[in-house]
Image: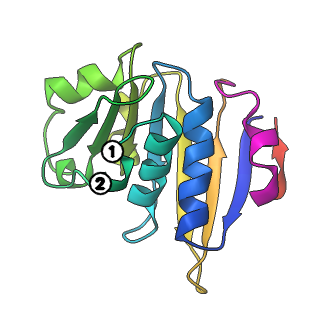
Amino acid sequence: MHTLHLYSPDVDSTIQIGRILGKHLPRGTFVALDGQLGAGKTHFVKGIAFGLDEGGWAGLRSPTFTLMLSYHGGRCALHHVDFYRLNESPELPGEILEAMHSDRHITVVEWASIWREMWPKRHIHVHIEATDEGKRRITIEDKHKLCPELAAALAEWVVEPAST
């Protein structure tokens, strides 16, 4: 799988798609997450936490003002980062850079394209787009084939065949 185009009819489906991705993510994965305000990025991250067996996933919140929140109850630590407020910053804080390049944790960054040049080479890029009907179109790019079984696991939401 290289790119999947998915359709999410509601918030619960967005969380479920994130959960399935979370179940397939190997340790050390960097997930770059983009989409406009209100697209469902934080709900998607809740799903990833759920897929990592992070017990506190329901209380997961956006780290917009704290920049990074970490959760340690799942199969590996999850670092949830938000670059939204870092748009004008001259550099990324060291703890965020460390989390982004960790081979032991999973790091998900909302508004990731603000600092695209800092992404680790091996990453998964997720873009969430809200449609006029309040539904979501989710595109998952896995150029490095970090999650080879993901396309089959997400088959019920796929709207276009996976490209390789």
For the point 34% across and 30% down, which residue is it? Answer: 73
Q: Nearer the viewer, residue 122 or 66?
A: 66
Residue at 56% from the left image edge and 61% from the top image edge: 14
User: Pointer 2: what residue?
Assistant: 59
The residue tagged with tag 2: helix, strand or loop? helix
Q: In the picture, residue 98 is in which quadrant?
A: top left
Residue 156 in magenta? Answer: yes
Say if 140 sits above or below 14 in the image.
above
Identity of the residue drawn at 48% across and 19% down? 27
Q: Quadrant of the C terminus?
A: top right
Residue nearest the viewer, comparing 21 with 97: 21
Of 51 and 33, nearer the camera is: 51
Name the secondary structure under disc 1.
loop
- Locate residue 40 relative to residue 128 in the image: left or right: left
Instruction: Please give the range of residues in magenta.
Output: 145-157
Query: What's the distance in space between the residues labelled 1 and 2, CA to CA?
Result: 6 Å
Residue at figure coordinates x 64%, y 53% from the top left:
139
Q: Is residue 163 left or right of residue 108?
A: right
Q: Residue furthest right?
A: 161
> Crowdedness of circle 1 by 10 Å Cα count: few (<14), some, many (20+)?
some
Looking at this rendering, what residue extends furthest in the front direction?
55
| Coordinates of residue 36 in the picture (x, y in percent) | 42, 67
Q: Which residue is mark 1?
A: 56
76 sits left or right of 2 in the view: left
| Quadrant the N terminus occupies | top right
Vertical placement of residue 81 versus 10, above or below: above
Residue 23: quarter of image: top right
Mark 1 is on which residue type?
Answer: Gly
View extreme (bottom): residue: 133
Three-letter amino acid code at the position of disc 2: Gly
